[in-house]
Amino acid sequence: MRVRDIAVIATACIALSGCISLPKFGAAHKAEQGRLERALEMNPANAHAAFSLGKGKLDIGEYSAAAKLFQRAIDANPKFEEAFLGLGVSLLEDSDFTAAEKAYKQLLVLNAKSVGANEGLATIELERHNLTKAREYATRANSLDPTSPQAIRVLGEIHYINGEYAEALAIWDTIETDPGADPSRVPFQNDLRQYLAKYGER
C-alpha cells in the first residue's frame, strides 16, 4: 500500500469549523486565495489564514508549500491541532517520514486521543516495514474511532503482508463502500478472493 492510499484520505479529516474551503478552479479560487494571502501578508501571525492557504496547497498536491504554511499556522498558534495534522499529512505525502513523525507526536502531546495522529504514525511505521508498531498505532486509532477507514486499511494491509488473506479481506470489506475508497483496489481484492478460494492462505 502506497502512502497516498492512506494519507490522501486524511486530507478530508483536516477540517476546522468555519474554515475556508477553497474551490480548486476559477475566479472564485483566485479571489479567495488573494484575500487570504493579503491577510497573511498584513498579519504574519494570522494562524487561520496560514492554515487555509496550507489546506489549499495540500488539496492540489503542493506538499512542500503546504507544510510551510501549516508550520506558520503552528508558529502563530502552538495549540492549533488541525495545523499539526495538516503538517503531518503534507510531510507524509512528501515522504519526509522523520519530520511527519515529529508533527504527529507533537499533536499527541496536545491531544492524546487524536485519531489522525495515530493513523499517520501507523502509516509511517508501515512504510518503514515495522509491522508491530504499525499495528499498535492502527489499533489505537481504530479503538478511538472504529469507523475510520485509514486505520482499517492499515490493519488490513498488515494482515495481507502476513499472508492472512481472509482476515485482510474481511477488514477491507467493511470500508469498500466508503466514499474515500480507491476504486483501483477493487480488482486487486477480487483477484485475492479468487486466489484464496483456490489456494487458501499460502
Image: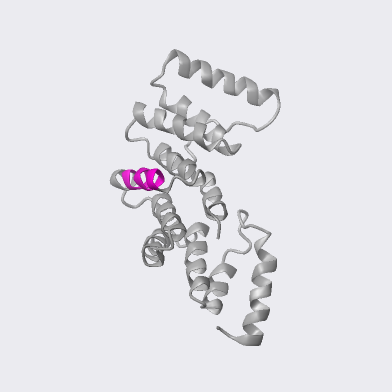
- Magenta-drawn stretch contains 104: yes
Q: Position of residue 42 (x, y in %)?
A: 45, 13
Quadrant occupied by the N terminus: bottom right
- As rendered, which of 86 and 129 lies closer to the eye? 129
Horizontal arrangement in the rendering, residue 141 relative to residue 29 (left or right):
left
Q: Position of residue 108 (x, y in %)?
A: 32, 48
Dominant SS of magenta comes to: helix
Q: Quadrant of residue 183?
A: bottom right
Q: Residue at x 60, y 31 (%)?
A: 22
Q: Position of residue 33 (x, y in %)?
A: 58, 23
- As rendered, which of 51 and 188 lies closer to the eye? 188
Can you name the residue that lies furthest to the left here?
Answer: 109
Q: Residue at x 39, y 43 (%)?
A: 99
Q: Residue at x 44, y 45 (%)?
A: 96
Horizontal arrangement in the rendering, residue 101 relative to residue 31 (left or right):
left
Residue 18 seen in render: no
| Magenta segment boundaries in residue numbering | 98-106
